[in-house]
Image (spheres, rainbow, N blue to C red):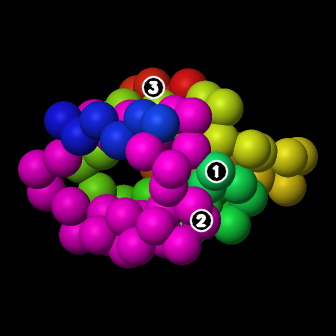
């Protein structure tokens, strides 16, 4: 479980974190609320979580500056990701 809420993260930091999720076998909960991650960060998480190798079950992304484009990336990821149980 990792809590990074309100840590002034930007899309660059989000992309770095998302890259670590590609082969994640231990982290199950990730909290990133109230950061300026935006659509680029959402796209990075969507790409990382679409590969099926991550154990992440809970992803909290509220108030991160998403637009419709970021929501589209995340919704496309949900079509292939069967492990994620909670996205907020």
Task: Judge from the rendering whether residue 64 lies leftward or rightward of residue 72; answer left or right.
Answer: left
Q: Which residue is disc 2 drawn over? A: 11
Q: What distance separates the C-alpha of mark 2 from that of mark 1?
A: 7 Å
Label ID, residue 28: none
Marks 3,2: beta carbons within 8 A = no
Alpha-carbon span between mark 1 and mark 3: 21 Å
Q: Residue furthest front?
A: 8
**Residue 85 horizontal side relative to residue 44, left or right:** left
Question: Residue shown at 56%/44% (left/top)?
Answer: 35
Tell me the quadrant of the picture where the N terminus can be found.
top left
Camera-nearest residue between 3 and 6: 6
Nearest to N terminus: mark 2 or mark 1: 2
Residue 66 or residue 59, whichever sits in front? 66
Crowding near pointer 1: few (<14 within 10 Å), some, many (20+)?
many
One can see residue 84 in this view:
no
Q: Which residue is mark 1?
A: 36
Cα separation, mark 3 vs mark 2, equals 21 Å
Q: Are marks 2 and 1 in contact (CB under 8 Å)?
A: yes
Q: Residues within 10 Å of mark 2 (few under 14, many from 20)?
A: some
Q: Which residues are magenta?
A: 7-35
Q: How many marks?
A: 3
Question: Circle 3 is placed at which residue position?
Answer: 86
């Amino acid at each position: 479980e990792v809590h990074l809420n309100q840590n002034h993260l930007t899309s660059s930091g989000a992309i770095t974190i998302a890259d670590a999720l590609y082969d994640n076998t231990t982290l199950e909960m990730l909290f990133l609320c109230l950061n300026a991650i935006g659509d680029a960060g959402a796209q990075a998480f969507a790409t990382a979580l679409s590969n099926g190798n991550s154990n992440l079950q809970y992803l909290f992304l509220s108030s991160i500056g998403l637009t419709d484009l970021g929501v589209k990336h995340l919704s496309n990821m949900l079509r292939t990701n069967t492990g994620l149980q909670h996205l907020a």
